[in-house]
Image: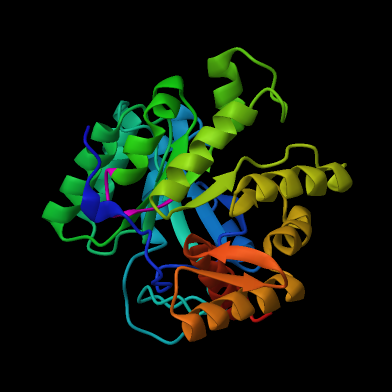
Amino acid sequence: MTPNPKSTRNSLTTDHIRPRRTFIFAPGLNPDMFPKALATGTDIVCVELEDGVAPKDKDLARERAMALFVQSSGPPATDGTRTDGTRTDGVERVVRINSVREQFGLADVAAVLATDTPPPVLMMPKVRTPDEVVWLDDLLTERGHGTQLQVIIETNQALEAAYEIAHCSTRINALFFGGVDMAAELRCTNTWESLLYARSRVVHAAASAGLDVIDVPYLDLEDLDAMVVAARQAKDLGFSGKGAIHPKQIEALNEVFTPTANEIARARQVIKTFEEADTGLVVIDGKLIEKPVLRDMHRIVAIAERTGV
C-alpha cells in the first residue's frame, strides 16, 4: 500500500503531542478496576478485551467496556472523568479490541459502530497489513466517530509493513511494540539483543510518521532495577514510553521517560537560538545543530509542559 502523504505528522506543530510514558491494562470484565487504573499515575489506561479475556467471557467484557463510555450529563465523577466523555485528568482512555481478522474482533468493531459514545482510542492487536487499519478507519469515518487508533506491531507481517502501517491512517497516534508475540513469531529469545532489529524497525516507522512508539511491558515485577535499565535502553533507542503490568512500576517508568531539567533547558535554548538565527543550522556550545533536531526539541518542551515539570 502506498503511504498516504496526508498522514504525516512530521511538522513542528505540537498540538497532537501528549505524554505517553506509561500504559497499564484494566480488565474489561471488571469495570470497577477502571477508575483505580486511572488513578495510578499512568498516561494511558487500556481496557482489555483481547488476551486477558477468556473466549467464554468476551461478550460480557465487551458489553461492560462499552458501558464505560456511555454518554450522559452530570458533574465530574470522583475518578476524575466526566460521564460526557471529557477527560479532566489527562489520562488517555483506550480499548484493546480483538484482532479484526477474528470473529471476536468483528464483534468488538460492531459494538463500537453501534454506540453513540465510542471509546476515544482503539488499540489494534495482531495486525498484519495496513489494509486492516484502513478498513477500520473507513468504518469509523462512515459512522462519524472520531476514535483514534493505536497499532501493535507484533507479527512478522506487520514488522515487514511497519512503515506502511504507520502512514496508512491519520487516526493512528502511536505504535506499540509487542515483544512477547514478536519473539515467538521470530523464533528468538525475548531479550533486548535478540529483538533489537525488530524494535529499531518499529521506532523507525513511528518516527517517520511523527507517531509515539511504546515498548512492551517489563514482566518481572520483583526486579525494578532491571526494568529501569530496560526502559532506559528503550528511551535511548527512540521509544516514547513503556508498558506496565502493575501500578508499582509506573512511577519509575514515568521518571525515565520524563524529560530532565537539563534536557528541557537545552531544548528551549535550541528552539530560541533557531528562532533568532532564522537559518538551517546553528552552533550551540561549540556543537553544530541542524534544523531537523527542532522536532525533538519541540516535543521535549511540549511533554514537559503537559507533565508540569
Residue 22 screen position, x and y as percent: 63, 56
Q: Is residue 200 left or right of residue 291?
A: right
Residue 200 screen position, x and y as percent: 57, 35
Residue 198 screen position, x and y as percent: 56, 29
Outermost residue toward the top in this view: 187
Q: Is residue 124 left or right of residue 241?
A: left
The residue depicted at 29 percent of the width and 34 percent of the height is: 130
Count of numbered badges drawn on the protein = 0
* Quarter of the image that includes the C terminus: bottom right
Q: Relative to 258, is 153 above or below?
A: above
Q: Relative to 72, is 103 above or below?
A: above
The residue closer to the viewer here, 266 or 41, is 266
Whether 104 is among the magenta residues is no
Residue 138 screen position, x and y as percent: 16, 47
* Quarter of the image that includes the N terminus: top left
- Can residue 244 be seen at all in this image of the molecule? no
Magenta stretch?
A: 168-174
The residue closer to the viewer here, 28 or 142, is 142
- Can residue 24 be seen at all in this image of the molecule? yes
The residue depicted at 56 percent of the width and 60 percent of the height is: 20
The residue depicted at 67 percent of the width and 50 percent of the height is: 235
The residue closer to the viewer here, 174 or 260, is 260
Q: Is residue 75 left or right of residue 260?
A: left
The residue depicted at 70 percent of the width and 18 percent of the height is: 189
Scheme of image coloration: rainbow
Q: Relative to 83, is 117 above or below?
A: above
The residue closer to the viewer here, 157 or 80, is 157
